[in-house]
Amino acid sequence: MQESLKLTQFSKGGGCGCKIAPAVLQEILTTENKSSFNQLLVGNESSDDAAVYQLSDETAVISTTDFFVPIVDDAYDFGRIAAANAISDVYAMGGKPLMAIAILGWPVDKLSTAEAKKVLEGGRSICAEAGIPLAGGHTIDSSDPIFGLSVTGITNPKQVKKNNTAQEGDVLFLTKPIGVGVLSTALKRGVLQQTHYDVLLKQMTTLNKA
């Protein structure tokens, strides 16, 4: 076990945990046929945070998956950040989260299982804060550590918030400061001060609920 390794050593890219570049993602998705399901209110077309499927006039299910490689070195904090990020996608769509399933990839030959447990504990703590169970999940032995959640939520179809419905004159409310990406990059480069790390951690572990 090489427990001296830092989790952020496995983060090869910038942004939100090594996401595929938008242009590359668009090329991948162009081969996908559009859905013919009338009940699917939100799919890939508008690049939203989650999919929305209508069950009745008053009920729709929100489904999202979000995971990434570590953007901090503390395993517990990594779990909290990843969980808050995934659950907040449901809030962003105007819904209420109901339950979550964990997604964990771990290089068992490089990092200790004790660290993996801390990641799950961090994720579970945020689920508890959101009032939902972490009801299971799936794990693999992977070359890089990854963690996130698949979250199921619920909303009224009339309350769904989409990316493509903004209009000129709308008021934009910022619920958190802008600039956490700058702080996370500074952390990876080893130049982030503790006070700024505390700010980073607070913002990235705060749920975007009303």
Image (cartoon, rainbow, N blue to C red):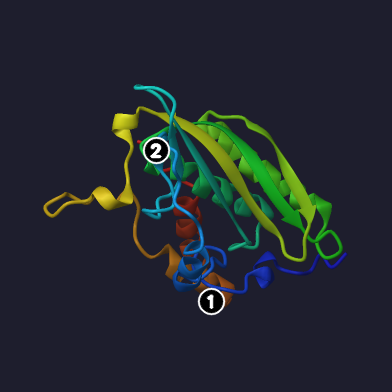
- Image quadrant of residue 160? top left
* Disc number for residue 99: none
Nearest to viewer (mark 2 / mark 1): 2
> Three-letter amino acid code at disc 2?
Lys
* Disc number for residue 209: 2
The residue lying toward the viewer, choosing from 178 and 94, is 94
**Comes first in the chain, label 2 or label 1:** 1
| Image quadrant occupied by the C terminus | top left
At x 66%, y 43%, the residue is 102
The reply to whether residue 192 is in sight is: no
Question: Between marks 2 and 1, how big is the CA–CA gap?
Answer: 31 Å
As drawn, the residue found furthest toward the left would be 169
At x 34%, y 61%, the residue is 178
Relative to residue 98, is residue 113 drawn left or right? right
Crowding near pointer 1: few (<14 within 10 Å), some, many (20+)?
A: few
Relative to residue 73, is residue 117 drawn left or right? right
Crowding near pointer 2: few (<14 within 10 Å), some, many (20+)?
A: some
Residue 47 location in percent, x, y?
A: 40, 55
At x 53%, y 66%, the residue is 28
The residue lying toward the viewer, choosing from 7 and 63, is 63
Residue 75 location in percent, x, y?
A: 68, 55
Which residue is tagged 1? 191
